Amino acid sequence: MTSQSIRSLPYVSPAATDAEYAQARTQGWLATSERGFEVLTYDQGWEVMSSKEFDIGGGFGNVLDAVGLTEGPYREEWNKIIVCNEGDARDRLRKPFMHLLKPAQVAKLQTKVIELINGILDDIEDPTDVDFMAQIADRLPTQLYCELISAPLEMESEIYRITNSINPPLLTFNRERLQESEDAFWEGMAFLRDHIEARRGNLGDDFTSELIRCVDDGMIAEDEMMSVAMALLIASMDNTMHQLGLTFGTLLEDRTRWEQVLARPTAAVQAGEETIRLCPRFNVVARHASRESVVGDATIPADSWVMVATRSGGRDESRFDAPDAFQLGRPPSKALQFGGASFSCLGATLARLEISQMLRIVAERFPNIRLLGDWEKTVGPMVTECARLRVSLV
């Protein structure tokens, strides 16, 4: 693809609709937007995310810049967290996550996840009118986090309040909540510092204890431990909460989709992947071309931003038959939103476990679950949030 043909690429909005993405794909796999190039198709999206020709160009630091968090102590702490790092620093910070969240380790949590889900469902007093987000989706990742770090479950509400105040204002570019985000960050730091110190003399089989052992074994430095602990606090709940809501909203808005789940009780993992394809939490995965790079028939100029549009790639006609339909039994495909290579989401296995087990248990216990009115989601340039999801479980 020549420079001239690049200039003639279709334009898509960062908040394009599924129909607008579909129209753009009729003209090819690549488009432009105000933020750079937009990869519209599945295979080319994976090519970009798997290529060593692309980095993250500062990663989440670009989001912090966009929301106005450019300097000061709060920004300095964010600069230490893995999502704002690449190269040797990122590789070093990945090690404890890869150790603690590897598939074999996460598999050991299945019994605990099942116990938590059943407990959450048992707590519902009126099954005929349930705020799915507040009463179910928000609680599972928060309770699991408590279990991971060996914090009392009684801290669930406090931890939810902290994590729900740190990341959402940044991901939605809400400057009005920036002070709330900073205050919650410092509160989270203080909590984790005290928790880690208390755990040092009583190590067990939990994330906090393993993190301390990672320092003792030289995997990370003492001053990096808080950055790793804060990364888990920030990332392990908010995204999974919303993906749980988006998953159930997508299934229940068309009863035939839920009927497929009921008909194949062993297909909960597939059902989770199919809803992530249709309605991902992350709408884009950003990559930066540090030098001139070739993708397919296009030469991407150096210092260009390339956005893998997950909502478009997930409905790519060249990859998926009837791409707008929910269909169990499709050939396996990896979810674009979890990224790839050294920038992949380290919590993806844990999130998948929570989603698939929630689907399986709700299908077993409450097969007649249905929407109460329309569900609402908010599609932004970076993420989609489940804004309203009320259901009857019976």
Image: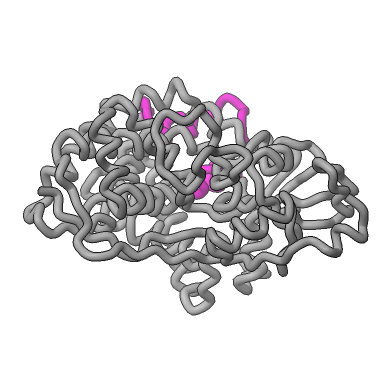
Residue located 24% across and 55% down the image: 132
Q: Residue at x 58, y 42 (%)?
A: 336
Q: Check if residue 184 falls in the magenta segment.
A: no
Tell me where residue 181 appears, x and y as whole percent.
47, 67
Q: Is residue 231 left or right of residue 61?
A: left
Task: State the residue in front, 138 or 391.
Answer: 391
Residue 76 appears anywhere in the view: yes
User: Seen in the image, is 306 located left or right of residue 357?
Assistant: right
Residue farthest along the top direction in this orientation? 104
Relative side of 237 to 176, left or right: left
User: Is residue 74 among the parts visible in the rendering?
Assistant: no
The residue shown at (19%, 52%) is: 370
Classify 64 as above or below 55: below
Above or below, 214 against 80 in this view is: above
Residue 228 colored in magenta in the image: yes
Of residues 197 and 15, the one nearer the viewer is 15
Percent from the top left, x then y, of residue 283?
Answer: 55, 55
Q: Position of residue 142 (x, y in %)?
A: 32, 48
Vertical side of 305 occupied by 244: above or below? above
Bounds of the magenta segment: 203-232
Residue placed most toward the observer, 99 or 187? 99
Looking at the rendered structure, the number of numbered marks drawn on it comes to: 0
Q: Is the magenta region chiefly helix, strand or loop?
A: helix
Q: Position of residue 131 (x, y in %)?
A: 21, 59
